[in-house]
Structure formats: C-alpha cells, structure tokens
Amino acid sequence: MSKKKGHWGDCSFCGRYKLTTREHIFPRGIYPLSSATSKVQRITIPDCTACNSGTSDDDAHFRNVMSVAGDATDAVQELWEGPIRRGFAQIDGRRRALDMFAIMRPAPDAGPERYRIFPAEDERILRSVRKIVRGLSRYHNLSPVVADGQVFADVQREEIPEQTLAGFEIGTTDSDICAYAFLSLGGVDGMLSAWVLQFFGRTNFLAMICADEQTRITKFGK
Ligand SMILES: [Zn+2]
C-alpha cells in the first residue's frame, strides 16, 4: 500500500473519481537494484486504494515466475541473489515457492532434473499481464478505462509475422527487463488494441483489448 499523498481524479482501473496515487504499471519487483531508475519502471498512472491493494503478492509471484521462465540473464541473476531469495525466506516464502512449483513440469528433453514453467496455466500471472496492459492502454490514451474482463492475454505461442509487427508502435523499452509494443485497432471487429510484451528478453505474452467482455468471450472463448 502506498503512503504517498493522493490526488483526486479518475482511477485508471475502476474509472471512479476517487483519491488516487501514482502507481507503477510494471511491478517494481521485476527491476533489480542496478536498474531501479530505468525508463519503463518510471511509468506510472493514477489508481485508487481499492484497485491498488492486494496486488503486492501477485507482483511477487509474477516476478518469481518470470525469473525462472527461461534463461538466467544478468537481471534475473541479480533478482535471485536479492529480493527473490529474501522473499522465500519470509514467513509466507514456502507458499510462494509452492505457487511456483505448481506450474512447473519436468522437461526431460532439456536434461535430467530440468523443468519448464508454464505461465499460461497460472491465472494469477495472466491477471498480472492483463493489469499491465490495462495500465498501458490508459497511459497511451488508447481507450477509456479498461475492465479486466475486456482483456484476453496468453503466452505467445507462435511467431508473429514480421509484416504484422511492422505496424506496431514500440513502447518505452528496457530490453533486458521488459519491452512492449502495441497496435490501436480502433474498435474494428470489436477490437480496441493488440499488445505484445516481453520480459527479461525471452518470455513473451500477447494481449488483446476488446470493446467489451462479451466480445472477448466470443473471440477467444476464455
Ligand atoms: Zn480504482
């Protein structure tokens, strides 16, 4: 919870006129100390206490899962040696570890005792991705307040054709930690915008913001 002084305004997530504070769109926890002043990390939007409370646990889980979802980069290594190790040592650290193991599967093709992690099987991870996208949509003034139900998010399962990506606008980017690009779709076919996000240079997600929840269910089935 933030102790910062608030300002009255429209919350980016519920749209209500409330006392809001500036909150980071990307969880601060994914930034190791050496990158704490990076460009993406400094992107903030206003939100209310109700929308902002209870997300710190999701943020820690997101950081943990993203850090093991691929190769150990320098940034990931730094996180493991600092906040992640400290997090597991805390009182709820055992639960945090179990949350992570729940989405790991043996990967015998990669070698004995190797595991792969499946972020798309974890609703909390996808919720974190959806929240980032909702915040970015507001930050870029693409659409009015976006509800969670309007957003479809999944891990990127196939290569995106070069000509499709060519139309995307590149967002503020720290390629070693997080990067994103987006395409405004202007409501055509019930679609407001398309998003690609990448964490630690190797874990990619896709997201679509639909005009409403029904459109999302019709188009994506979940
Ligand atoms: Zn709110």
Image (cartoon, rainbow, N blue to C red):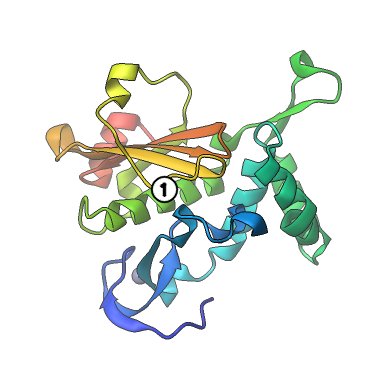
**Residue 6 position (above or below residue 96):** below
**Residue found at the far bottom of this picture:** 5
Between 172 and 51, the one nearer to me in the picture: 172
Q: Position of residue 77 (x, y in %)?
A: 74, 44
Q: On the picture, is 87 further left or further right than 44?
A: right
Residue at 65% in and 35% down: 69
- Amino acid type of the residue that numbered disc 1 sits on in the rendered structure: Arg
Quadrant, the N terminus: bottom right
Q: On the picture, is 92 further left or further right than 127?
A: right
**Residue 29 position (above or below residue 160):** below
Quadrant hosting ligand 1 = bottom left
Quick one: SS at disc 1? helix
**Residue found at the far top of this picture:** 109
Within the image, what quadrant is residue 118 found in?
top right
Q: Position of residue 43 (x, y in %)?
A: 41, 60
Dot 1 corresponds to which residue? Answer: 130
Between 36 and 20, the one nearer to me in the picture: 36
Q: On the picture, is 42 further left or further right than 139?
A: right
Q: On the picture, is 30 further left or further right than 12?
A: right
Residue at 48% in and 23% down: 157
